[in-house]
Each structure stands twice: as C-alpha cells, then as structure tokens.
Image: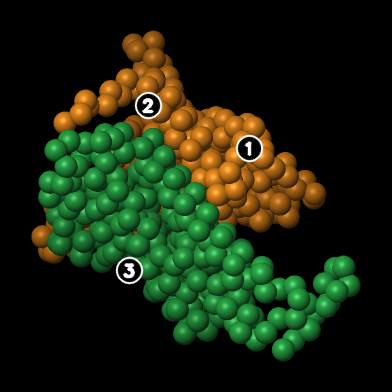
Amino acid sequence: MRDKEDKKGTYVSRSRLMLNSEEAQQNDFIFFNNTVLIQGLALTPVIAAAATLKDAVILAIAASIIIIPTRIIGDATVGWIKTRLRIIFYALVAALILIPDMVLLYRWFGSRFIALGLYIPLLAVDGAVTWRASVSQKEGVRHVFRNAFSTALGYSFVICLIGTVREILGKGTVWGLKLLNGALFPASSIIPGGLLITALFAAFWQGITGFLKKILFAGGKEQ
Amino acid sequence: MFIDKFSGLLLIGVSGSFLANAVLCRAVGLDRVKNMEEDGSEGIFFTLQTLCSLAASCLFWLVRDLAEAPASFLEQFGISKYYSEVFIWPLFIALVTAVVFIIVFVITVKAAPYDKVTSAARLLPFAAFNTFVSGVILLESSARHSFWEMVVFTIGSNVGYIVSYWMLREGDRLLRNRDVPEAFRGLPVRLLYLSALAVAFYALTGHILSPLL
C-alpha cells in the first residue's frame, strides 16, 4: 500500500494493483487510448479511404508494416538526434519502409490498392506513425515494440470495424458479398458519411472508456 | 491569351480553396482536429505550414523527374512505370520536406521575434510533416500541373485549409456547452460538425448521391 496526500489534505490510499492497472491503462493503445477514436490520429485514411472492408484491410496492413519498425528504429535514435529534428528521421524511415510495403500490397491486391490513391503514401507522415517523435526519453525495444504493436492493432481493429459498417450502409455488402438488397445510407461511402460514422463510433468509444475508467479507477481512489 | 491563362489559374486557385478543399473534400490535414490550440499560436502555425507547403511543392516539382531512375528498378517486380514512380514519391516528398524543414528552422531561429521563437520551433515539426503538406504535393503531382498552376493550387489549398480550420474553430466555440452529452464532447462533436461542413462543400462541387440501389 502507498499513501499520498491530495490537495484537500486527506490521505488517499492506492493499492499496488490499482497503480498497476492505471499504468496498464496508460499503455493501452487498443482500447483506452485508441489511436483513432480517442487520440484523433490517423483520421485521414479512416474517413477518406476506408469505405469498404477490403480497403480497410489494405490500409491496416500498410499502416501496421510501417508503424512497428519506424517506432523501434526511431527509439534507437534517442540521444543521437535532437528531439525537434527526430520527426525528419521518422518520416524518412517510414517513407523508405513504405516502398516495399506498397510493392507487396500492389502484388496482393492489384487495382484495389491503386484505387486508394494518395491515402497509402500519406501514411508515411501520418500522426499515428510520427507522434512518438517528440518523446525525449529512450523507452527500450521491448516497451516500444509492445506499444507499437498495440497501436497497430487498435488502429487495424477500428479501421476494419468502420470499413465494415460503411460498406454495409453504403453498398449493402461485406467484402463484396451481398448482404442487403439495397444501400441503407449511400452517403457513408463518401467523406461526409465517413466523418459522421467515425464521429458516432468515437462518441460510443469515448462513452464506454469514460464509464469504465469511472468504475475501475475513480471509485477506488478515495477511502 | 493572357486572360485565358489568368482565368485558368484563378479556377485552379478557387478549386484548391473551395471546390476541391483538401480538408473537407479529401479529409487531408485532419491531424489537428483533436488538438486545436487557442493560445494565439494558430497564426504562427498557418504561416509556417503555408511556407513549408509552398517551398516543398516547388522543390518537389523541380526534382520529381529524378524519381524515374529508382522507379525503373521497381519495374522488374512487374509494376508499371507510372505506378513505380508514384511508389517512390513518398520518399522524395519526405526528403524535400526535410530540406525545407531545416531551412525554415534556421530562418525561424535567426529571424523570428524573440518571444515567438519557442512557439515557432515547437510548432514547426507538425507544420512541416503532416498529411496536409504531403497531400497537397501528391494531389498537384498526380494532376501534373505546370509550375505556376502548382504554385496557385498550393496557395489555394492553404487558403482552403485556413478557411476550414477557422470555420471549425468558430463552430467549436458554440459546441462547448453543457447540452452536448459527455460522450460527444471533444473529438466526436468536432467530427459531426465537420461532417455537416463537408456536406456543404460537396454540394458546391455539384455532387449528387445516387438514389437507393
């Protein structure tokens, strides 16, 4: 048990378990700190390009291949390159990794990949890839890998979820297979619809995480 | 002749600002939606971003053809020449943006007023490396604009960015009230508002949704 005095002068007791769970929550980029719906990063591909599940899967693979190695290589440069200049290194590494990434995806998905236009090349400078460039302390390979993997997983899950919903509403299909007789909301395939659906998902996600945080953490703080 | 050229350039500028607004019609540059700052630093951010965007676009326009050599290497993987060049572009864009970033950084540190230097140095990485700056370069490159068309399109797009950001900020002030449910506060309500703005901009382009299939 650890005691800590709060602003009012009353003692707050927090168990080790509570501290561990709070720390786990801070490092959770799948649910509590989701890259897209909570942090508001990588919104561009989700809103503009992920109109179908197949497009969402292509974007998820492309982003995951970039995020993990860029973060690990980026962390290795801490202390070597000034913090304010590290974003250059992140963008260059991501753009370099993007070349074989795009060749691979082109061979796998062909014309579907080409139809995504500028949204795959833009991943090199996306916030989801570069936002850790401002971190000034070395985190260690294992920690960085875990965080980057968690970020990529959270991003992939959300983009696929939104892509599926947009495809069902906009085309009445899932992965090209007919599910409904007609489109319920054709506008979901274009940017205004993407913004609307992402906003609703963000509200739902924010509501649930807020509720869970209250139950898990706020209730146990004061005794 | 001159009138034709001028009206053509004007049309490109207007389309960059409104009809093909990068933020609302292509969702490019949404990185700052979540973290809007109201500490008076927006002016510095817009100035830096416009400067970086224009300089990087010009530099990329000059070196774009150099992508042919490494692109021919990719052709052996069964990729057509056009696409292999496009695959090299992100690296070229990152390189030219890096050059511009360093030049603007040095100029900012040397020339900016003392009280603005810290703020400018803090904002410069986000003003140079973001989806808006790279997105505008990719858009104008794929359209294969001439030099002056590229300059006008880049300036127009930056004007469009400032207009959409200003509309978002004004809307955001009205949306900060207790009537907004807690779950919708922050990012969700801003995205909802942007969605309504995007519908208006789509209407400007004459976009008509297909009827129920």
Q: CA distance from mark 2 to mark 3?
A: 33 Å
State the hue of chain B.
Answer: orange
Residue B83 vs B13, above or below: the answer is below
The answer to whether residue A89 of the structure is visible from this angle is: no
- Residues B21 and A167: in front is A167
Whichever of callouts 2 and 1 sits on the residue coming sooner in the sequence is: 1
Q: Chain of mark 1?
A: B
**Amino acid type at image mark 2:** Tyr
Of helix, strand and loop, which one carries label 3?
Answer: helix
Give the side of residue A17 with respect to residue A106, left or right.
Answer: right
Of helix, strand and loop, which one carries label 1?
Answer: loop
Q: Which residue is mark 1?
A: B179
State the hue of chain A.
Answer: green
- Specify whether disc 2 shares its chain with disc 1: yes
Q: Which residue extends farthest front?
A: A223
Query: Could you classify mark 3 by the number of other residues whose Cα lies within 10 Å: few (under 14), some (14-19), or many (20 or more)?
Result: some
**Amino acid type at image mark 1:** Asp
Of helix, strand and loop, which one carries label 2?
Answer: helix
Q: CA distance from mark 1 to mark 3?
A: 42 Å
Q: Quadrant of the C terminus of chain B?
A: top left
Q: Chain of mark 2?
A: B
Residue beneath the point at 15% across and 47% down? A179
